[in-house]
Image (cartoon, rainbow, N blue to C red):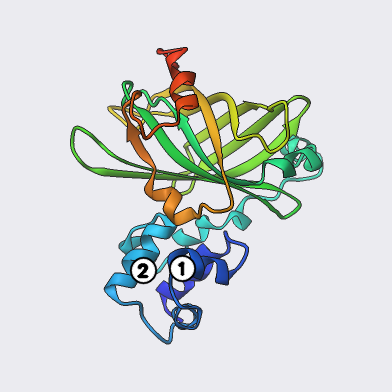
Amino acid sequence: MTALSENLRSLCRNYPSISQVCREIGINRHQFDRYLRGTSRPSAHNLLRICEFFGVTEKEIERSSSLMDHTSLDHLPKQGPRSLLADIFPGDLSAARSYVGLYHTHFINMTWPNRIQRALCLVREQGGGVATRYVGRVRDPHSSQILRSEFVGQLTVQGDRVFLLERHRKTSDALAQTILVPPERTNATYITGLAFMMAWRPQRTPFSSRIIWKRLRNSTNFHSAMKQCGLYDPQSPSIDPVIRSFFADAPVSFLKI
């Protein structure tokens, strides 16, 4: 088995089935199985499609190390029965299940304070709890450099609030927390709250921002939703009017710490 096939297997663990991955990428299942076994190598075109779908680079997906294992949420540390985290997660699992799904998240990053950043968050039930996978990808308007980030974490419902605790996939010193206010009705399209994150540049500075999630319906797949991530002008017609209004009500929506 090659490093590429091992990394593909790790990446696929974040999805309900291999068949779903193949459908969303648009690759034949039998061909993809050969990639997973290491008996065939993707063409340059297919490798690019695979990397874009999972939000990784070609160098990362072919790296022979345990790096890619961190894309699986299974590696998160198990907490002891008396630990604080064990008391917090999964929390009210029945209530947390109602948030399972795919979302576009919108917030103001102090690196680009005049833009709305749209990212992607996958919420799914796993291992007796509700796990999250956040993927951000933007093109810096100043340098044109593509910047990517990925966080994995867990979601819990405590009382009348939803809490997410996440850590960066590649570094252990980057944590993010989000607090959401549950909507009045189940399965609502929009969920609002407050996020605490780290800025990209000019230095790693912690800050907070109002945040609004938009639930993506079943017809939207991960790959197409990822393509819509990036930085947007607050008045862009590509931004949902509800989301534009949300940020217009509070133009200074981040607080530098």
- Asked whether the residues under the numbered discs 2 and 1 touch, taking CB atoms below 8 Å apart as contact, a structural biologist would say yes
The residue under label 1 is: 7
What number is the disc on residue 62?
2
Helix, strand or loop for disc 1: helix
Q: Residue furthest left?
A: 143
Disc 1 residue type (three-letter): Asn
Q: Residue 254 location in percent, x, y?
A: 43, 17
> Within the image, what quadrant is residue 112 found in?
top left
Query: Label 2 vs label 1: CA separation?
Result: 7 Å
> In the rendered image, is residue 237 in sight?
yes
Q: Is residue 216 left or right of residue 5?
A: right
Badge 1: few (under 14), some or many (20 or more) residues near its Cα, within 10 Å? many
Residue located 72% across and 55% down the image: 127
Q: Is residue 232 left or right of residue 211?
A: left
Residue 126 or residue 211, whichever sits in front: 211
Disc 2 residue type (three-letter): Glu
